[in-house]
């Protein structure tokens, strides 16, 4: 493949859409990827109007079917290398399947899709056709998440006994959906969001953070899923007690009714030798607590090995990740950019006919997306039986 920037096509993103915005910034972050096309809205006429209003020129399409079909006849320089799916959850499965079958890689928003049947088909198809498939679990893209993963998985904190992984918000503390607010309306509708509201929307992020940092899986859950806002169909408060694959325990919790909480995602990992704490609202540092010692705060960009806790030699690929000097803050957009940057590496290898990783070490993959959906389906079952311990299906 030539050295041209990768061409990205958007599915969704018109008319006041939310998450397309940080994604499109992240796509353009390095100059090696660009948005070139979009099917931005379900109504074809509005989709074309929205594309014409895009801040830079893109090819507009009336639907993602049209965008994918048109790709076949485009010259190589204009062909899509991957699509970015930023539609509500019920419009993830269909464009993802169609893109893979048309030989286009897929970067899809979370949760992966609506149910385990769809998730299983997506996993099987991506394996059979050998297509790179990323899932946008944003917070894995922070350098400090990579560093946390290294610390925990290299055993520096001993055996993991307990994890508290959480995502607490307050924006759905009132019946916002009744005002017609776009993002609230579909998130509380089981047909468009899936079997869980709060759990599917942000509980899956908390689960992914736990799995990414610790490398452990949740094997069993005892779930409480509550709806505090009257008349709402899906949960707005999600509290899941978990058994972990190493015999440890965890709490995966999420809430959207805690007034004052914004995007309070964080993780506490308590091991036999020490504890790690990290919060995405202050993503530039992690805190390590060791017995009978002052807490250690490690800042991105100012980490050096051989300090009495970290070994002298730190992993070269971790230390070589592109960052800016400490104290010039990285945040949400940088995390998105790191995910797209790493996905780009795999897409370029795939295009060149080489073996690509897509192994979940740099961004969540379709199997991680499957695990998120399996977790949600199992928590719904457990909550319906009053929190009965329930096993997750095996991948
Ligand atoms: N990774 C994250 O941190 C994060 C944050 C927010 C949202 N999300 C996920 O991103 C997705 C979108 O969420 P949002 O808040 O941006 O929603 P949104 O309602 O703001 O935007 C959805 C967009 O999809 C478009 N759309 C709907 N059906 C379509 C179709 N058939 N064809 C083309 N476009 C269509 C809408 O017109 C709109 O432009 C969801 O799956 C959500 O869970 C992820």
Image (tube, rainbow, N blue to C red):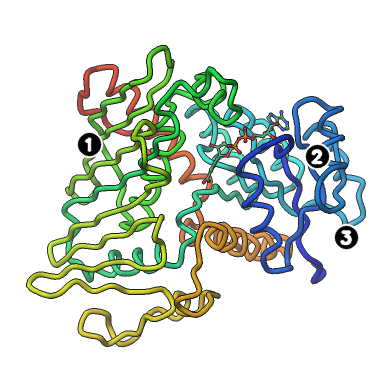
Q: Which residue is mark 3?
A: 77
Left or right: 165 as drawn, with respect to 332:
left
Q: Are marks 1 and 3 in contact (CB under 8 Å)?
A: no
Left or right: 259 as drawn, with respect to 155:
right
Which of disc 3 and disc 2 is earlier in sequence? 2
Query: Can you give x and y, in whole percent of width and height, for residue 283 in the image?
Result: 41, 62
Which of disc 3 and disc 1 is earlier in sequence? 3
Which of these two is toward me, 22 or 88?
22
- Of the two numbered discs 1 and 2 in the rendering, the one whose residue sits closer to the viewer: 1
Q: Which residue is mark 1?
A: 241
Q: Which residue is mark 2?
A: 68
Estimate the spatial distance between the alpha carbons at disc 1 and disc 3, rounded to whole Å: 50 Å
Q: Residue furthest left?
A: 292
Which of disc 2 and disc 1 is earlier in sequence? 2
Query: Can you give x and y, in whole percent of width and height, for residue 11 in the image?
Result: 72, 39
Which residue occupies 49% across, 57% down? 359
């Amino acid at each position: 493949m030539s050295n041209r920037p990768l061409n990205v096509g958007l599915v969704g993103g018109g008319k006041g859409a939310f998450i397309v915005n940080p994604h499109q910034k992240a796509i353009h972050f390095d100059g090696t990827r660009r948005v070139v096309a979009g099917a931005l809205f379900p109504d074809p006429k509005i989709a074309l109007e929205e594309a014409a209003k895009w801040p830079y020129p893109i090819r507009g399409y009336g639907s993602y079917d049209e965008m994918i079909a048109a790709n076949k006849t485009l010259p190589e320089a204009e062909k899509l290398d991957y699509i970015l799916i930023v539609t509500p959850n019920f419009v993830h499965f269909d464009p993802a399947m169609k893109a893979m079958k048309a030989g286009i890689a897929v970067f899809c928003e979370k949760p992966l899709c609506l149910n385990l049947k769809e998730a299983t088909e997506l996993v099987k198809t991506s394996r059979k056709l050998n297509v790179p498939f990323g899932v946008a679990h944003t917070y894995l893209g922070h350098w400090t998440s990579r560093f946390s993963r290294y610390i925990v998985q290299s055993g520096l904190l001993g055996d993991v006994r307990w994890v508290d992984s959480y995502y607490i918000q307050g924006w759905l503390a009132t019946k916002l959906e009744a005002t017609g607010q776009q993002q609230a309306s579909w998130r509380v509708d089981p047909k468009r969001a899936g079997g869980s509201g709060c759990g599917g929307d942000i509980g899956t992020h908390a689960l992914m953070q736990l799995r990414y940092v610790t490398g452990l899986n949740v094997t069993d859950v005892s779930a409480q899923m509550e709806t505090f806002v009257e008349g709402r169909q899906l949960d707005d408060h999600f509290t899941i007690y978990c058994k972990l694959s190493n015999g440890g325990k965890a709490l995966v919790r999420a809430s959207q009714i805690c007034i004052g909480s914004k995007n309070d995602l964080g993780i506490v990992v308590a091991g036999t030798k020490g504890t790690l704490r990290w919060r995405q609202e202050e993503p530039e540092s992690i805190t390590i607590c060791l017995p009978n010692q002052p807490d250690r705060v490690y800042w991105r960009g100012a980490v050096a090995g051989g300090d009495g806790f970290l070994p002298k030699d730190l992993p070269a690929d971790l230390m070589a990740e592109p960052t800016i000097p400490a104290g010039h803050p990285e945040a949400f957009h940088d995390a998105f950019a790191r995910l797209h940057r790493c996905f780009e590496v795999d897409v370029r290898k795939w295009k060149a006919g080489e073996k690509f990783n897509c192994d979940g070490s740099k961004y969540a993959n379709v199997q991680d997306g499957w695990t998120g959906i399996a977790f949600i389906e199992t928590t719904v079952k457990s909550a319906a039986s009053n929190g009965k311990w329930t096993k997750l299906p095996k991948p």
